[in-house]
Amino acid sequence: MKTNLLESKFIYRLFWCMVLIGIWQVVSISGVFEPLLFPSIPTIYYALKSSLSSGSLIKESLYSLKLIGLGLSIGFIGAILLAIIGNLSRHFNGLVETIAAIAHPLPGIALLPLIILWMGTGANAILFIIVHSVVWPLYLNMNTGFRSIPKIYREVSQNIGLNVINEVLHVIIPASLPHILAGVKIGWARAWRALISAEMIFGAAGGKGGLGWYIFQKRVYMDTAGLYAGLFVIIIIGIFIEDTIFEKIEELTVKKWRTVA
């Protein structure tokens, strides 16, 4: 049944992608827009093929994914520590919630002047922006998940003699997994946005970067087909992560344990 659902989802994805590609090609050959602004699908394909063959796009994609993976890991660890300690201490939770209310709406790019003063324009500055973009939505979702746990769960864990660490590991976190996973998905999406924006700035300043730097270079040299090729890679990676990794995590956890429909 699960395999059929995944196959159906893949078929729907493929169908609508083909429809969108067809619409793009029709608009491109219609002449409504200049070819430089709206290149055809074959032109984008050859630009993508060329970048992949040279290895530049693969190297820059791996560089970006490395930074996102590191930023997500740091953000996840920080968010779960804040949520756990806040769940155990009412006063500390009030402090963290206040900081989150201030920092969460604040775009990482808005902190650029300060980040440049603190860290320069290297990979550490990009990583800082990613962590800032990830940690707050993760924390807010985790905190909501911890608060939504029925009191009877914690009462039972205390009655059977679980200490704080075991209660967190075996009761609080498993019961909050839907919220945690939702926070990770939001954090992943925000990490992509922060990464591309930061790399287009810091990559240009530091002379290297990932997909954001690749897109920036293509824009500077007016290689519109290459620019769209870079955007296509970002979309494909995003869909792959969403439809495979996150879907697999849900199957192994929240769906398996019946915590979601």
Image (cartoon, rainbow, N blue to C red):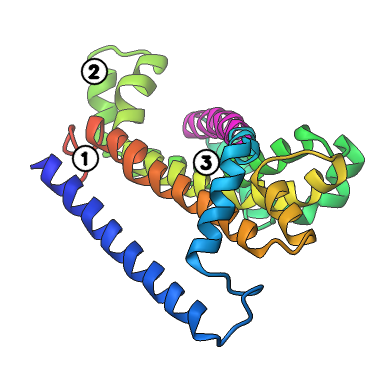
Q: Who is closer to the viewer here, 33 or 247?
A: 33
Up the image or down, 27 lies above or below 76; here it is below
On the image, the x and y values in percent for residue 36 come to 66, 73
On the image, the x and y values in percent for residue 61 come to 59, 39
Which of discs 2 and 1 lies nearer the camera? The answer is: 1
- Quadrant location, the N terminus: top left
User: Bounds of the magenta span?
Assistant: 65-88
In this rendering, does residue 189 appear at all?
Answer: yes
- Label located before the other in sequence (3 or 1): 3
Residue at image mark 1? 259
Q: Who is closer to the viewer here, 86 or 114?
A: 114
Q: Residues within 10 Å of mark 3 (few under 14, many from 20)?
A: many
Residue at image mark 2? 159
Give the Cα separation between the discs numbered 2 and 1: 23 Å
Q: Residue at x 55, y 50 (%)?
A: 48
**Which secondary structure class fits the magenta region best?**
helix
Tell me: 229 left or right of 214: left
Residue type, mark 3 in image: Tyr
Residue type, mark 1 in image: Thr
Q: Who is closer to the viewer here, 117 or 207?
A: 207
Query: Is residue 222 shown in magenta?
Result: no
Give the Cα separation between the discs numbered 3 and 1: 20 Å
- Label located before the other in sequence (2 or 1): 2
Q: Residue at x 30, y 25 (%)?
A: 171
Tell me: 44 left or right of 130: left
Q: Residue at x 36, y 20 (%)?
A: 169
Give the Cα separation between the discs numbered 3 and 2: 28 Å
CB of mark 3 within 8 Å of CB of mark 1? Answer: no
On the image, the x and y values in percent for residue 28 come to 51, 77
Q: Secondary structure at mark 3?
A: helix
In which quadrant of the rendered view does residue 31 lie? Answer: bottom right
Labelled disc at residue 139 = 3
